[in-house]
Image (cartoon, helix red, strand yellow):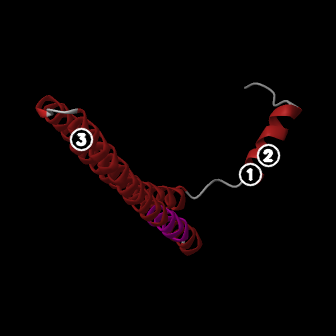
């Protein structure tokens, strides 16, 4: 048997006074946090997919307009036809870009509000779980 040193006694007393964590409680809170994080991530992912879908549809529309411009230019028979074609093209483009900017702003604002609400709900759920445990 080896003699006990005073430092061993200090460590033993310290270990006795340090409370051990309630692992069941930690596990419950951690599980709740994981669930809420998963919900938050799913909602954020859906919002990003919606934005991506909207933008890709808009880009597709604009590309079709660009292709149509070249077809229309090819059919022009006068300088006046060419000027009218370009004027119509740019007027349509500016209108469509303005409308798309408004749609994207509404989608982004709605997504930000939804994600903020979900984050608040997640925080409240985790706090409630912590207090209940």
SS of the residue under disc 3: helix
Give the label on residue 14, or none: 2
* Residue 93 drawn at (x, y percent): 32, 46
Query: Which of the 4 image quadrants contains residue 66?
Result: top left
Q: Are marks 2 and 1 in contact (CB under 8 Å)?
A: yes
Q: Residue furthest right?
A: 6
Residue at position x 79%, y 38% from top? 11
Is 79 situated above or below 59? above
Residue at position x 77%, y 42% from top? 12
Q: Which residue lies under the disc numbered 3?
A: 85
Magenta-tinted stretch: 114-124
Query: Which of the 4 image quadrants contains residue 69?
Result: top left
Give the label on residue 18, or none: 1
- Taking the image as shown, residue 18 lies to the left or right of residue 130, namely right
Labels 1, 3: front one:
3
Magenta-colored stretch includes residue 86 = no
SS of the residue under disc 1: loop
Query: Which of the 4 image quadrants contains residue 15?
Result: top right
Task: Tell which circle, 3 or 2, labels the residue nearer the N-terminal end.
Answer: 2
Q: Main secondary structure of the magenta part?
A: helix
């Amino acid at each position: 048997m080896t003699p006990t040193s005073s430092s061993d006694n200090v460590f033993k007393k310290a270990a006795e006074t340090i409370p051990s964590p309630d692992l069941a409680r930690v596990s419950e809170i951690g599980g709740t946090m994981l669930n809420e994080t998963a919900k938050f991530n799913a909602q954020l992912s859906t919002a990003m997919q919606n934005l991506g879908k909207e933008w890709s549809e808009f880009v597709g529309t604009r590309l079709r307009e660009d292709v149509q411009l070249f077809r229309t230019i090819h059919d022009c028979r006068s300088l006046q036809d060419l000027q009218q074609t370009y004027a119509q093209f740019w007027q349509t483009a500016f209108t469509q870009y303005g409308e798309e900017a408004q749609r994207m702003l509404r989608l982004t604002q709605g997504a930000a509000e939804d994600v903020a609400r979900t984050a608040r709900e997640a925080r409240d759920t985790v706090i409630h779980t912590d207090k209940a445990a």
